[in-house]
Image: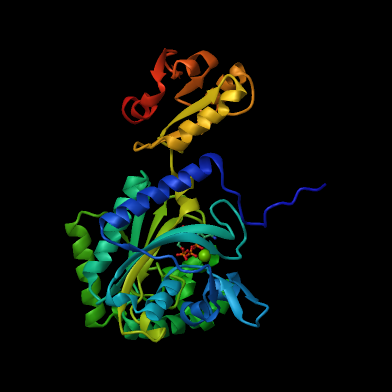
Amino acid sequence: MQKIRTVRGTKDLYGVEILSHNNVLDKFCKLCKFYNYNQICTPILEHSEVFTKSLGISSDIVSKEMYNFIDQGNESLVLRPEGTAALARAIVANSLHQENNKFFYFGPMFRRERPQSGRLRQFHQVGVEYVGKTNYLYDLEVIILAEKFLGEIGIRDKLVLEINTLGNEQSRSSYNKALKEFLINNSTKLSEASKKRLQKNPLRVLDSKESEDQEIIIKSPDIKNYLDPESKNFFESLIKGLDKLKIKYKLNRFLVRGLDYYNHTAFEYKTSEIKSQNTVLAGGRYDGLIKSFGGDDLGGVGWAAGVERLVLNLLNLKNKEDRMVCIFSTNENLDIEILKILNDIKIKKKIQISFLITGNLKKKLSKANKIGAYGCLIFGEDEWKKNQIIWKEFKTGNQKLIALNEIENFLNKDL
Ligand code: ATP
Ligand code: MG
């Protein structure tokens, strides 16, 4: 029979890869908890309007990437493509901001893109969001979290933080007008894709990776000249803050985020590789988004990172795994005694215990070796009679007898 494959752009996660994912998640969660961010888990299924209303019709996500379908009850649903709009919806639906204003999340996201390394149709994101008063200090706080997180997983030094401002709504819209005019005047030299973008969302042209667009983009008006005092002040304070914190960054006036809800701050952590999947973590400010969902007029700032892209950048995929111990008998009649041990045991330390059932002693030892066990607890007829079990450590080859009622102590203390 022909094997059924995974859906294009999706992956089964197992082995080293899932260990790396878990490693990243583990560090992310610990850090978020340390900074008192609260976990939130929103559904994978959402009403389409959560994203169509907020991300913008011309964004890549809404215009071509969403998994959108009508279900049996005639509802228009999507598999969520990103976390921020879903969080905004959840905040309004549950009045969450009255008690909390810092959130973190992780989980799968779905976008119908052309699959390639670091670009999947089902991928995973970790993200943090701060909602509340608009204050550049919160932009700094979420950037600190990004710095710590990337540092913890050991890739901060391989990345460059690029930062820009889009200004507040007024500044953004006056810049948009000027940019559109400039691009229209130069449209004959633009790529076909950019000609289309120019009509719907000129800002997105700055994001273009087409070589023919670069010459025009370079000459385009600079957002800095269109910032009102509030926007200018906000960005200057943020940059001064980064300097004070000694966080390295690069100003990039062409950095625009592809979604409509962004204003003021936009930032990305990028690798130096010249390919379209070089951004591992991206974020920005989205004042007004909560209000657009019918909530209070709150500001917001946050970021999301693609776990697959982070994992691709981890130099050493090797994880410091918890020690694993195999436990088995030399006589199948004793297997029930082993299950009794497993049923009673209370382990406080981070170790793993793996019960091996089939095969003779030699086979079980070699299996234990193969799956990377630190050592084995072996139960034979003679030991059972004396209420003992053999401990064999692979690295040293040492072997000793342990009393059955001492196993718990041994695993918790001596290992
Ligand atoms: P790109 O320009 O690479 O398409 P994006 O701007 O669409 O990225 P965001 O919406 O900002 O990406 O998502 C934040 C992060 O999520 C990205 O920096 C990336 O690490 C990850 N990401 C986005 N899309 C994918 C995907 N299709 N597969 C894997 N990771 C992704
Ligand atoms: Mg994209």
Query: Is residue 41 shown left or right of residue 7?
Result: left
Please provide percent x and percent y for residue 75.
61, 81
Name the one closer to the observer, 83 or 55.
83
- Count of number-bearing discs: 0
Please provide percent x and percent y for residue 107.
48, 60
Query: Is residue 125 shown left or right of residue 242?
Result: right
Name the one closer to the observer, 132 or 29.
29
Where 180 sits versus 309, above or below? below
Residue lying at 50% horizontally and 56% vertically, measured from the top left = 277
Q: Give the residue furthest to the front.
A: 385
Please provide percent x and percent y for residue 390.
45, 17
Residue lying at 22% horizontally and 81% vertically, measured from the top left = 229
Name the one closer to the observer, 317 or 56.
317
User: Does residue 229 appear in the picture of this structure?
Assistant: yes
Query: Is residue 2 shown left or right of residue 101?
Result: right
Residue lying at 28% horizontally and 80% vertically, measured from the top left = 227
Q: Give the residue furthest to the left.
A: 244
Where 15 sits versus 284, above or below? above
Question: Residue 195 lies in what quarter of the image?
Answer: bottom right
Rendered-image quadrant of the C terminus? top left
User: Does residue 192 appear in the picture of this structure?
Assistant: no
Where 239 sits versus 146, above or below? below
